[in-house]
Amino acid sequence: MIELLKYFRILFMSPQISRERLKDFTESHIARLTANNPGGIFTTILTNITNAYNSYFGDLSSESVNLAVQEGKTIAMNSSRTALEKNLNDNEKLIAYTYRNNPEIYEEFYPLGLKEYYDCDLPTLETISSRYKTVLSNHSADFPPNFTTDYNTVQATFVANRSAQTTAKGNVDAERSDLAASRPALALQLTTNLLTIALQYVGDESKADVYFDQSILNAAFRESEKKVASSIDPAATQNVFDNITKGEVEIKGKNNGESILYIGFKATAEEPCTAADKVVNPGEDGTTTAAELGYTSVNKYLNITNPGPMIGNYVIEKV
């Protein structure tokens, strides 16, 4: 049977095609298209695929760089928090002695004791360390000059490092958001190129190998014929399997990422899953059947959707 529908799909979105293989496949296609562009008839799609390639793999590079920056900022922030907590602990001894006859002033510094500073989260520590700074300023005349100066220095360092870490996290989130848009754009342009070239050479199947390296795709699908291990971008949907023919086929999977995932059988390879389908929480694994995931003769595409803001990771296999 001829399935006309498949000629209207966006190809190259399958999770079996890893980012590395997609990179190799696209680079090979660009090189072949550059070398085989008679009379410049493919210049437009050559320009478009080059731009789509640079956008997606530029985003990947940016994400990698920003992750490294975020890690460095986090290390610096953790170090500055430790220094701040040590200063608060050391200060407590002198403050307790100075106000041994005025406990109400001592409580201005430590209303809930030292434990409050150690047990709080980062935003709270930023708030209460600023409160402490104000109290110390109000009573600075009771202490040596460097006592106040030393605290203000470590507190300012913590606040600065905390701000830098937050900014770095924001940059990573922004790059991941870009990735969610740039891979589908690359897949769409590859599909457009395939159809444009095929239209130019209808009936001449030998041209397929001139412009595309099928072996790269074959290797990707052979490696994951029964098992798919992949990442999935935020707000993205991937088709995991489209060759399951029986509802009793067992499906084994694990969510080994930090984002909740939806999984189920759909009528097309692009249709997203929702919370009405199987919801798989981070760290959850198990085995079920295709029928339990919604397989029918119409809903035969096993898709997975990442509804969260973070990149997800999963492993799914046919048992």
Image (cartoon, grey):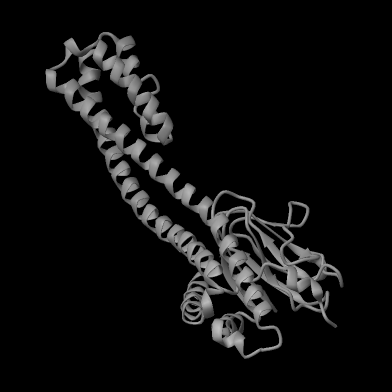
Seen in the picture, residue 203 relative to 46 is either above or below; the reply is below
In which quadrant of the rendered image does the N terminus lie?
Answer: bottom right
Left or right, residue 147 beside residue 107: left
Q: Nearer the viewer, residue 161 or 3?
A: 3
- Quarter of the figure with residue 161: top left
| Quarter assignment of residue 140 | top left
Compared to 142, does 220 lie above or below? below
Residue 177 visible (yes or no): yes
Residue at 66% across / 89% down in the picture? 205
> Image quadrant for the C terminus?
bottom right
13 left or right, relative to 34: right
Residue 18 seen by the camera: no
Q: Residue at x 33, y 26 (%)?
A: 129
> x and y percent of residue 202 in the render?
70, 83
Give the percent coordinates (x, y) of residue 85: 29, 34
Residue 274 locus on image (x, y percent): 74, 53
Q: Is residue 71 above or below residue 87?
A: below
Q: How many numbered marks does the figure carry? A: 0
